[in-house]
Amino acid sequence: MCTYLTEKITVAGSGKGTASWFSLTDATVYLDHPQHAPAEHTLNIDFLNPAQGPSARVAVELTAESARALAQAIEATLESAPPGLV
Amino acid sequence: MNDALIAETISITGHGGEEIEAYLARPIGREPFGGVVVIHHMPGYDGGTKEITRRFAAHGYAALMPNLYHRDAPGASPDDAAATARAKGGVPDERLVGDVGGAADHLRALEGSNGKVGVIGYCSGGRQSFLAAVSLPFDAAVDCYGAFVVGTPPEGMPLKVGPIVHLAPNLSCPLLGLFGADDQYPSPDQVAELDKALTEAGKPHEFHSYEGAGHAFFATERPSYRPEAATDGWQKIWDFFGRYLTA
C-alpha cells in the first residue's frame, strides 16, 4: 500500500513555495512512495499552510538515511547555539 | 496498425451531480470501440496515469480517467492535490463509486461506443476498481495490486478505508487481478483470500502473481518497475479486455 504512519505538527515560520514565500502553520512527516525521488519509499515532509490552499506546500522526499542525518543536523545545530539565541 | 488517438481534458458529471475534471483519450477512425475507466493511483491524476490512459486509446479503447481529487484541490498540481487528499484520509468510497459511474456513463454515451465499458485501477485504484465493479454494472474489471480489498490499514495510517471482500457476491463482471508476489499490501495471503471469496461466490476471475515483483510494478517512472511483469501484465490486460469489451 502507499501510505503509512503520518505525524502532524503545528509549526511557525515561513517556507518558499512555487509562487513566493508564505507563512507556515502545519507540517506532516510520513513514510510513503515518493512523487519524484528515485526510491521505493522515502521519508516525506510537507510544510503547509492549509488556509492558503493545497499549493501552499513545500515538499521534500528524503531517503531514510538522509532524513536521519537531517534530524541529527537540526538537533546538533540547535544544541550548539549560544545561550539565549534560541 | 492505426494507433491514432486524441487526448484532452474534459469535464464530466460525477458523484452527486457535481462536475469534475477528467482526462479522455479515444481512438480516431476505429469505431465502434469499447470504453475503459482508468482509476489513478494514490499519487493522483498524474502524468504517468495519463500516459496509461493514452495507451488504452492507442490500443483502440476510449479511456477516461476522472480526477478523484478534483474536489479536494481544484486546479492544484497533482502532487499537491494528492497530499491534500491523503491528509483527508483518501477518497470516500461513496464518492468514488459516483465518480467512476459518471465516467462509465460518459464513455457509453460517446459517439462510436459499442456500449461496453471496463474499469481498471492501480494501487489504491486497484481496490477502487473492485469497489466499482461490485457497485456498478461493468463488462470487465482489472485490479492491479489493490490493497485493503482484504484486510484493514494498520494502526496509524491516515487512510480511512475498510475491507470490501464481503461484497464479492455482487461483482457485476469478470475480474482480472495482477499482483506482485513480493507485495505486502496486498500480501499473497490476502490475494488468496480474495481469490477464494470469488470462487465461492461463483464469480469468473483470473489472478496472476508475478515472482520478483512487488507493489507498483507497472509504474515505469519508479524503481518498483519490473519490465517482465509489466510486459506480461499488459498482454493479460489486452487479452482480457479483448474478450469482454470488443464486438
Image (tube, coloured by chain):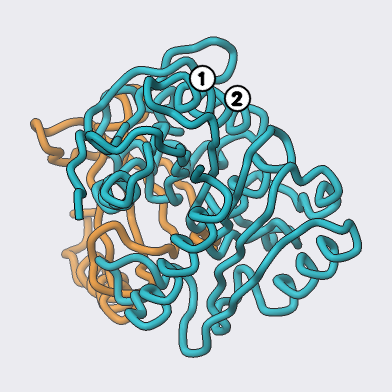
Chain where mark 1 sits: B
Chain under disc 2 = B
The quarter holding residue B181 reads bottom right
The furthest residue to the left: A20
| Figure check: B47 above or below B231 | above
Left or right of B91, for residue B64 = left
Which residue is identified by label 2? B98
Q: Which chain is orange?
A: A
Q: Residue furthest right?
A: B200
> Relative to residue B90, is residue B70 depicted above or below?
above
Q: What number is the disc on residue B14?
A: 1
> Would you say the residues marked 2 and 1 are in contact, meaning their CB atoms lie under 8 Å apart?
yes
Coordinates of residue B149 in the picture (x, y in percent): 70, 56
Q: Which residue is more in the foreground, B186 or B4? A: B4
> Which residue appears at 58% of the width and 79% of the height?
B209
> Tag 1's secondary structure?
loop
> Quarter of the image containing the N terminus of chain B?
bottom left
Query: Looking at the image, how many numbered discs can be counted on the residues?
Result: 2
- Residue furthest to the front: B247
- Identify which amino acid the numbered label 1 is placed on: Gly
Label 2 packing within 10 angstroms: few (<14), some (14-19), many (20+): many
Colour of chain B in the rendered structure image: cyan
Residue A53 picture location, percent across and down: 31, 25
The residue sitting at 67% across, 42% down in the picture is B133
B11 sits to left or right of B145:
left
From the viewer's perspective, is A26 left or right of B1? right
The extreme top residue here reads B17
B210 or B5, nearer to the observer: B5
Say which label, 2 or 1, has the lower sequence index. 1
Q: Residues within 10 Å of mark 1 (few under 14, many from 20)?
A: many
Note whether residue B243 is visible. Answer: yes
